[in-house]
Amino acid sequence: MPTELPSDSSSDSNILALASQEDIYIFDLLLQDRGASEWEHLVAMITYAQYTRSKHEFIRSYFEEHNVMPSDGEMKAIIFLFKNINNNALNNLRLNSQSLLQQVLEKHSRKMLSQNISSPVEKIVKENTRFWVAVQASMVASFFYSLLIALILFIATATLPNTKFSRAIKILFEVEQTNDEEATKE
């Protein structure tokens, strides 16, 4: 359960006023490129939310540890970490935000793709396919495929008798006939 922070002292209002002024500065710093793409604006908004969460976590942990709100100087120190656009803290938050947004978008796009394409196809296949019908269809297809191959071999050897292919087929048939003749003699 979240820790309740006090809200009735005058120093709290100073901290909140300071934080509000600094928040405006950080927000403007993140969105300084007004011509940026929607992606960059969304990343900036998520970065700002992470900045705000970091600041609130600092205030909450400071209060839990010391049982008082942080002073103006302590708040300035934590906010100062984020004030420069070239600062590592703000850049790390921005990179983290980009990564987080990209992961979420990829996850949801894969989910939407599977729901919109795979699910209807699976449903149609399940409704219209029965196991034994599929087995029978496979057997009939194998029979016709074998018949087609035999027909091609017969036509190829009959129409082109002097090709290497025809001679190889004849040799194969002769070996079988020779083996059959030897088996009948024994």
Image (tube, rainbow, N blue to C red):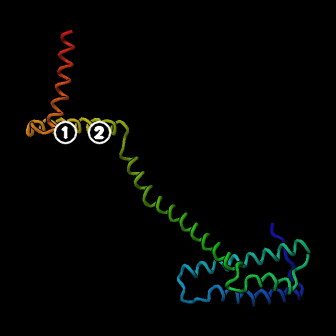
Q: Quadrant of residue 151?
A: top left
Say which mark, if any, is on residue 15.
none
Q: Is residue 182 above or below residue 146?
A: above
Q: Quadrant of residue 59?
A: bottom right
Mark 1–mark 2 Cα distance, whole angstroms, equals 16 Å
Residue at x 16%, y 37% (from the top left corner)? 153
Residue 179 image offset from top left, x and y in percent:
21, 19
Residue 146 image offset from top left, x and y in percent:
23, 36
Residue at x 18%, y 34% (from the top left corner)? 168
161 and 79: which is toward the camera: 161
Q: Quadrant of residue 175?
A: top left
Residue position marked by numbered label 2 in the rendering = 137
Q: Is residue 116 above or below residue 87?
A: above
Question: Are the residues flagged by discs 1 and 2 in contact, CB closer than 8 Å?
Answer: no
Residue at x 26%, y 39% (from the top left corner)? 141
Residue 29 image offset from top left, x and y in percent:
66, 88
Image side of residue 115 versus residue 57, left or right: left
The amino acid pointed to by label 1 is: Leu
Query: Of the residues tagged 1 and 2, which is closer to the observer?
Result: 1
Residue position marked by numbered label 1 in the rendering = 148
**Secondary structure at numbered mark 2:** helix
